[in-house]
Image (tube, rainbow, N blue to C red):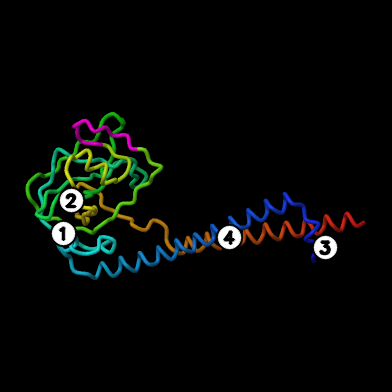
Amino acid sequence: MWTFLTRLPVVATLITFICVVIMFALGNWQLQRAEQKTERLLAMERSAKTEQVGLQQILSGNIGEVLDMPVNFEGAAESNRYFLLDNKIQQGRVGYQVLVPLQTSSGTVIANFGWVAATNSRDILPSILIEAEKAHYAGVISLPLNNAMVKETALVDGEWPKVLQQTDLKVIQQHYKQEVLPFVVLLNAQETSKFVRNWQPVVMAPEKHMAYAVQWYLLGFAALAVFIIAQRNKLKRNKK
């Protein structure tokens, strides 16, 4: 065994070792994602059985623990100053999600009113009617995650509506020039609503992550096995 190891080519062995380590690391990462998704689904199930609470109760608790919490409140919408979240697909159609600031007794909260279809031209934004009167709203709490690789394109120039590339509350505050609450409310679906509210907080099921993990592990074992077999055959040929 020692003789076999000492005769291994350094470069090929190093490359194989690195590849195998990366494949196993990716497998472990997929397992972690599966566990996270499972915990998220369980949390959503628990939240669905929880009674709706007010915004003030949400703010009085730990923000990190209010994800998917059902909430209801009264608020007045900013009918002229709202945001369009770009590149949102609904049943194969391109559109926007509409983010609207709502003035409440607990502060300004950003509510996701749902999806609307885009026009045939990127230069023409969809015409959206938002009722400004004070109304009752209900939904679930969402904590947006920002992607550092996404570059924001909207300019702070006072023109509305604003097209955003992601739900970044700090960027929203810069445009809105007012502090907003540290979460977004995904409004509940309504049959009479012109907005499509088909929320998918968990896009990929835990089982799919598990399948990907198995694939990465098998690829790692396969790469290792192919390397060992190839080197054994090479040593046998050299002996002959």
Indicate the amino acid at tag 1: Leu
Q: Magenta residues, as a range?
A: 152-162
The residue lying toward the viewer, choosing from 184 and 209, is 184
Pointer 1 with pointer 2, Cβ within 8 A: yes
- Residue under the image location 54 percent in, 57 percent down: 26
Foreground pick, 205 / 47: 47
| Residue tagged 3 | 3
Q: Which mark is residue 55?
A: 1
Q: CA distance from mark 4 to mark 3?
A: 27 Å
Q: Secondary structure at mark 2?
A: strand
The residue carrying mark 4 is: 24
Q: Residue furthest left?
A: 133
| Mark seen at residue 109 | 2
Do the CB atoms of the residues marked 4 and 1 lie less than 8 Å apart? Answer: no
* Mark 4 vs mark 2, CA separation in Å: 43 Å
Q: Earlier in the sequence, mark 4 or mark 2?
A: 4
Around disc 3, counting alpha carbons within 10 Å, would you say few (fewer than 14), some (14 to 19), or many (20 or more)?
few
Comparing labels 1 and 3, the label whose residue is closer to the camera = 3
Pointer 1 or 3: first along the chain: 3
Q: Position of residue 110 (x, y in %)?
A: 20, 49
Task: Check disc 4 and report its element: helix, strand or loop.
Answer: helix
Counting labels gives 4
